[in-house]
Image (cartoon, rainbow, N blue to C red):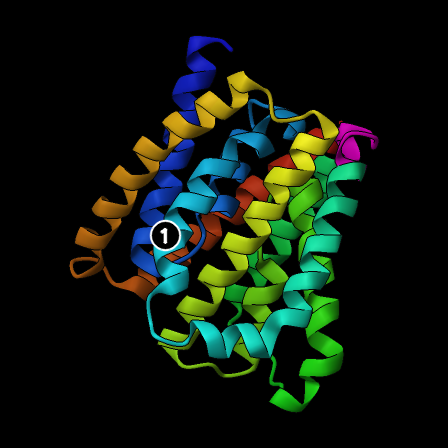
Amino acid sequence: MELYVLVIVGIAFFCGGIVKGITGMGLPLTAIALMSIVLDLQVAIPLLIVPIIATNIMQAFQGGHFGELMRKFWPMLIAAAIGVFAGTYALYRLDSSYLLIALGLLVFFYSINNLCAIRLSCTERTLPIVSPVVGFLSGILAGTTGAIGIPVVIYFQALGMTKNLFVQALGIQFLITGTFLTLSLIREGGLSIQYATISALALIPSVIGMLAGKKLRDKVSEERFKTWLYVLLLLIGLNLIRKGLF
């Protein structure tokens, strides 16, 4: 991998770390959106593995609701695991241009959803039916685009979860999905020693970014930061669609 590509990869994870440090989420989406400018998704997605798992271990177990959340959302997590294997299978068999368009559309509509402050509303009565569907869709998208958890984030917001529950539930979802993503990439032969090494090294800029983000949290308006972030992601999404089409 060329030096300038490694530098961009480092910048991508640093930026993803800043986003996670300020908002508690967004590292995979931010990093994959930036990396996909210079890397194919078949290369970029394996690089996410170590930062995803390492940065969500603590988040998954902090908050005191691990058992409660596992009992409530285990169908979603199982469905996500199945979706990850299906998505990773498709990742190495679909034309990369289709994957770029899919990622671009995902990033674009996620940005629009947040810029327009669109909020759905669901009750916990929907859990038996909706949560497995959301989990499976999230797994498919994680396997094919590396964008872990966007449907889950929207669903958790729709459930009106408290901030602490929301953050811990996302940590559990990202940790388990990231673990199964690792297994599925190994199964497909996509996680080489080289990629695993780069992924481990990517934890350094990720953690530095998270620490910087936590310091910025008290100095920068979170709402203003999110607005600029979603505008940037929207432009990146449009560029990914352009790359896929042309």
Q: Position of residue 9 (x, y in %)?
A: 44, 26
Q: Is residue 216 above or below residue 15?
A: below
The reply, left or right, for residue 5 in relation to residue 19 is: right
In terms of depth relative to the viewer, which is nearer, 236 or 164?
Answer: 164
In the visual, does 121 lie left or right of 27? right
Up/down of 162 relative to 213, above or below: below
Depicted 96 relative to depicted 226: above or below = above
Range of magenta residues: 90-98
Front-lying residue, 10 or 52: 52
84 in the magenta segment:
no
Query: At label 1, which amino acid type do we have?
Result: Lys
Residue 190 seen in the figure = yes
Query: Residue at the spot x=68%, y=58% of the render?
Result: 80
**Which residue is more in the foreground, 113 or 190?**
190
What residue did someone put label 1 on?
Answer: 20
Is residue 119 visible in this depiction of the protein? no
Question: Residue lying farthest top?
Answer: 2
| Horizontal side, residue 64 vs residue 29: left or right | left
Q: Quadrant of the C terminus?
A: top right
Please give the name of the residue rendered at 25% of the width and 38% of the height, measured from the top-left corner: 208
Residue 3 percent across, percent down from the top left: 42, 10
Compared to residue 229, the image places residue 24 above or below, namely: below
Residue at horizontal 42 percent and vertical 40 percent from the top: 51
Nearest the eye: 180 or 94 = 180
Badge 1 marks a residue whose secondary structure is helix
Estimate the x, y position of residue 168 in percent, counting from the top left.
41, 68
